[in-house]
Amino acid sequence: MVSAAQTLKNIALTHKGKLAATFSLVALENLLILLYPLVGSFAVNAVLAGKVWHALAYALMVLVIWLVGSARRAVDTRAFVRIYADLAVKAVANERQKGSVSSASAHANLARQFVDFFEEQLPTLITAAFSVLGAVFMLLMIEFWVGLISLLILLGFSIVLPAYTRTNDHLYFKLNNRIEKEVGVIERNQNRALNRHYGLLSRIRIAISNREAVSFLVIGASMAVLFGSALTILAQKNVQAGHIYAVITYLWSFAMSLDDMPRLVEKFSELKDVGNRVEI
């Protein structure tokens, strides 16, 4: 059985032209997003100094970010619908050789998750990595102690990540077991089996949701400590308004991207399990 990582590698090699065009725009978009707080800090100081044309550089940066983002969205839709069509045909063909129509239908739907990874999760991962690591780096450059606290928080979450991932792997193994059998349960049309099937699906999804909620709370508490520490440090200094803007903006970039991480980890656990089930 081919692993999820090998399947993703095969997809990337087969469709490297389409993916290269999409992810070049993703990288450019994230580089611009990483730089915009610095441009914003100059704009704030320019406004306070009455330099209108200097301040308008921020508006130009916003326009360029949106233009690149718009181009990416136009390109990636065209790329990924074609990739999914190719994968679905292969997944169905493999399952039909085994003589199972219901399994073929279920596996075609599961194959969509590999395309979703490239279309949704990988850009989100790239953005989160740019934002989290970039924000820590920029904070270390412009406000060292705030950057150091951010780095320590990031290291703390990295330590608990393996245990968090193992539990997610177990939950998604159970969830995909049920999803794979769903068409067969529906075809049998027995109320007891249907109630048991959907009841179990509900309990597993609630367990996944509860973990996501707890993760959100823990990250929120950590961010409150980080923001409180940053404001305390800044309050003891004589700094320009633009500097404060840049620090706060990088902190928000760090916080919002870190908040995406639990869902990304869950998606990777789901994808690993799908890779053990779907032959493409």
Image (cartoon, rainbow, N blue to C red):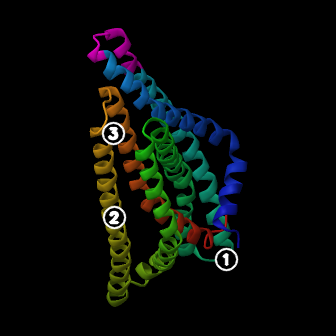
Nearest to the observer: residue 200 or residue 37: 37
Question: How far apart in space, not on screen, are marks 1 and 2 (Cα)?
Answer: 46 Å
Question: What element does badge 1 sit on?
Answer: loop
Position of residue 278 measured from the top left corner of the image (x, y, whole percent): 62, 69
Q: Secondary structure at mark 3?
A: helix
Q: Which quadrant of the rendered structure holds the C terminus?
A: bottom right
Which residue is the site of mark 3?
248
Judged by its main secondary structure, the magenta piece is helix
Residue at 43%, 62% (x, y): give it: 262
- Alpha carbons under labels 1 and 3: distance apart: 57 Å
Residue hosting label 1: 98
251 or 280, which is in the foreground? Answer: 251
Left or right: residue 128 compared with residue 216: right
Q: Are marks 3 and 2 in contact (CB under 8 Å)?
A: no
| Magenta segment boundaries in residue numbering | 47-60
Residue 187 image point, x, y percent: 44, 80
Residue type marked 1: Lys
> Would residue 222 be found to the left or right of residue 178 on screen?
left
The residue that label 2 is drawn on is 218
Residue type pointed to by label 3? Ile
> Which residue is nearer to you in this view: 278 or 134?
134
